[in-house]
């Protein structure tokens, strides 16, 4: 086995990795396409990998479930936060509406009071106008009678 064999093995591994990054699931690198002859550990490593495969699969499933649970929990938390924010905005909106209604009620009470004051003032003015009319009529009648009285009583 020469130095070129090692380089070819690395090239095969790197070619097998292209196009895999960015996947949403867990990724396990492929096994090397070549063995390092002369190294007695390569068969031991393969046997350990085969024995560990169910463990790795179980670990992969557990991690996938944990990741999915974490994502769902994060989404659920975001939904709850959005709902809480919407409820807070709605509460603020209702608080604003209630405050506006309270101001309008206060203005209506004030306008009602002013309306009564204006009605009293108008009635008072009407009574004074009627009184002035009577006084004017009495004055006119008294003025019209006084020349007759002056002519009838020459002093």
Image: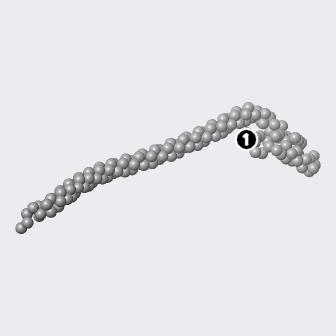
Q: Position of residue 57 (x, y in %)?
A: 73, 34
Residue toward you, 38 or 102: 102
Q: Is residue 24 left or right of residue 70?
A: right
In the picture, which quadrant includes the C terminus?
Answer: bottom left
Task: State which quadrant residue 46 falls in.
Answer: top right
Q: Is residue 12 left or right of residue 131?
A: right
Q: Is residue 107 left or right of residue 73?
A: left
| Residue 140 makes an appearance in the image | yes
66 up-or-down from 128: above or below? above
The structure residue drawn at horizontal position 78% and vertical position 45%, both measured from the top left corner, is 21
Residue toward you, 6 or 133: 133
The structure residue drawn at horizontal position 49% and vertical position 44%, both measured from the top left corner, is 90
Query: What secondary structure is found at the residue carrying circle 1?
Result: loop
Q: Is residue 123 left or right of residue 15?
A: left
Q: Position of residue 65 (x, y in %)?
A: 66, 35
Give the residue at mark 1. Answer: 24
Color theme of the render:
one colour
Q: Residue furthest bottom?
A: 155
Q: Position of residue 19 (x, y in %)?
A: 82, 44
Residue toward you, 60 or 64: 64
Residue toward you, 37 or 83: 83
The structure residue drawn at horizontal position 48% and vertical position 46%, both measured from the top left corner, is 93
Count the marks: 1
The structure residue drawn at horizontal position 50% and vertical position 46%, both measured from the top left corner, is 89
| Residue 6 makes an appearance in the image | no
């Amino acid at each position: 086995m020469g130095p070129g064999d090692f380089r070819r093995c690395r090239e095969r591994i790197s070619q097998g990795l292209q196009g895999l990054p960015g996947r949403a699931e867990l990724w396990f690198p492929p096994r090397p396409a070549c063995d390092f002859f002369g190294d007695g550990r390569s068969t031991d490593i393969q046997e350990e990998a085969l024995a560990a495969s169910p463990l790795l699969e179980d670990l992969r499933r557990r991690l996938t479930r944990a990741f999915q649970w974490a994502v769902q929990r994060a989404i659920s938390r975001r939904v709850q936060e959005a709902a809480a924010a919407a409820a807070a905005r709605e509460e603020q909106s209702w608080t604003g509406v209630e405050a506006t209604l309270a101001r309008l009620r206060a203005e209506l009470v004030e306008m009602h009071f002013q309306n009564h004051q204006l009605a009293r003032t108008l009635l008072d003015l009407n009574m004074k106008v009627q009184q002035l009319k009577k006084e004017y009529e009495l004055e006119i009648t008294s003025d019209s009678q006084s020349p007759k009285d002056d002519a009838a009583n020459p002093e």
